[in-house]
């Protein structure tokens, strides 16, 4: 029979959503977390305002070995469903850019709401309790923490991935999954700044400068702000493309996505006596214009420069190549690409096919969203789907 109907490991976004959903369906739920308070990652998200969903949520905005896996859960628990929930709690919100929704106040409101929802479902919380052992036999999962061993017919892995280790994040979910012979897609940091090698040392002088760009890796493109840092490249555009990037491959940056490659030829016809530097300073922050010019190695008035040279400069600015030396790793990664393989899970319930009663949700699963609220929506949707099935 077990002490509980379900034990959920991880009191983050997905775990709390799952616990509240199952608890309000009358299930006896225990929510366990090694942290002393729930929702630690929620609290730091969105600069403390929690970018809690994105109105443009669709499965094609997620990376997964199976791009169709997320469709079922996302289709059954939508951004509108989450807005209805926060509406019941009177939490004010606003849309920033690109469909990203944030709290007007604080991310604490989202955590407090999820705690209330768990209370409404009579969920028992065991916080500040690192799990030391997970076992399975006679149809029950046994979980050891502290000096207690508790049992339940269902166990939910909601402990996320290894990104942001300073909050206590680990690969614990993968270890448990492997213990039950579930495959794990090799995890790596995602939504993470790039580092640049000595070849691009020139750009370190631009630390703090940002510009709107279009960045491309293979066929994937994002148009958003890029930020130069003392170590490399960051900003939304770079974080987005980092989830797709493979080590030792180039990324291509269009510094002037609104202009064609021949724009300098038009400038030459209209004002031949204007210097190349002046034209670039009109388009870029001055420090950035100088750094690009230094790399291009051309100076002078437009009228004195051959059309071929101006076209080459236009092409270079439209497809500037960087080969990142790496990324800032899990310490700075907002999420993890990879995780528990979707091939072994039901897309409807998140239950493991080989191990009845074992579920995996949220970031622990090989489903990773774009920047901008997509990962929270996956947490709500996958948590809700499992909570309905427990």
Image (spheres, rainbow, N blue to C red):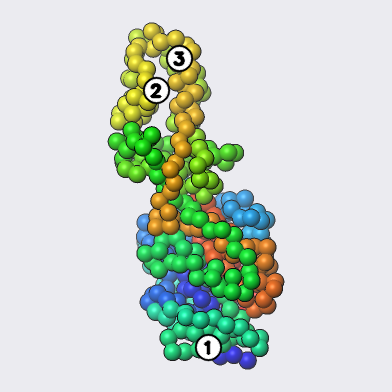
- For the point 51% across and 55% down, which residue is it? 188
Residue 330 falls left or right of residue 63: left
Percent coordinates x, y for residue 75 in the rendering:
65, 60
Instruction: Give the vertical position of 302 relative to 174 (above or below).
Output: above
- Could you classify mark 1 by the number of other residues whose Cα lies within 10 Å: few (under 14), some (14-19), or many (20 or more)? some
Residue 127 falls left or right of residue 291: right
Mark 1 or 2 closer to N-term? Answer: 1
Q: CA distance from mark 3 to mark 1?
A: 73 Å
Res. 357 visible in picture: yes
**Quadrant showing the C terminus:** bottom right
- For the point 40% across and 64% down, which residue is it? 165
Mark 2 or 3 closer to N-term? Answer: 2
Q: Quadrant of residue 67?
A: bottom right
| Numbered badge on residue 309 | 3
Residue with the mark numbered 2: 296
State the residue in front, 244 or 274: 244
Q: CA distance from mark 2 to mark 3?
A: 10 Å
């Amino acid at each position: 029979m077990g002490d509980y109907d379900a034990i959920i490991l991880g009191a983050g976004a997905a775990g709390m959503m799952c616990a509240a959903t199952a608890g309000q369906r009358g299930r006896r739920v225990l929510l366990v977390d090694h942290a002393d308070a729930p929702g630690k990652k929620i609290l730091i998200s969105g600069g403390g305002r929690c970018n809690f969903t994105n109105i443009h949520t669709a499965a094609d905005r997620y990376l997964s070995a199976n791009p169709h896996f997320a469709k079922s859960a996302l289709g059954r628990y939508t951004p509108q469903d989450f807005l209805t929930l926060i509406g019941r709690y009177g939490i004010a919100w606003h849309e920033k850019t690109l469909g990203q929704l944030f709290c007007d106040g604080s991310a604490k409101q989202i955590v407090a709401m999820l705690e209330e929802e768990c209370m409404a479902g009579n969920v028992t919380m065991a916080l500040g309790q690192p799990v030391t052992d997970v076992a399975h036999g006679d149809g029950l999962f046994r979980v050891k923490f502290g000096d207690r061993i508790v049992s339940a017919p269902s166990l939910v892995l909601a402990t996320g991935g290894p990104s942001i280790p300073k909050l206590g994040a680990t690969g614990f979910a993968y270890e448990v999954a492997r213990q039950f012979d579930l495959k794990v897609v090799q995890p790596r940091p995602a939504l993470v700044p790039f580092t640049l090698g000595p070849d691009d040392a020139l750009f370190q002088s631009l630390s703090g400068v940002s510009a709107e760009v279009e960045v491309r890796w293979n066929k994937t493109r994002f148009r958003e702000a890029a930020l130069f840092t003392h170590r490399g490249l960051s900003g939304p555009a770079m974080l987005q493309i980092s989830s797709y990037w493979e080590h030792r491959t180039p990324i291509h940056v269009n510094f002037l996505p609104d202009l064609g490659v021949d724009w300098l030829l038009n400038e030459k016809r209209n004002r031949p006596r204007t210097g190349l530097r002046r034209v670039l300073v009109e388009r870029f922050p001055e420090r950035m214009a100088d750094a690009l010019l230094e790399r291009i190695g051309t100076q002078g008035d437009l009228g004195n420069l051959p059309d071929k040279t101006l076209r080459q400069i236009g092409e270079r600015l439209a497809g500037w190549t960087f080969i990142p030396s790496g990324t800032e790793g899990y310490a700075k990664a907002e999420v993890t690409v990879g995780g528990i393989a979707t091939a072994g899970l039901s897309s409807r319930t998140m239950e493991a096919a080989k191990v009845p009663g074992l579920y995996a949700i949220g970031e622990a699963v090989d489903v990773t969203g774009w920047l901008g609220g997509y990962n929270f929506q996956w947490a709500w949707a996958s948590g809700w789907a499992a909570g309905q099935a427990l």
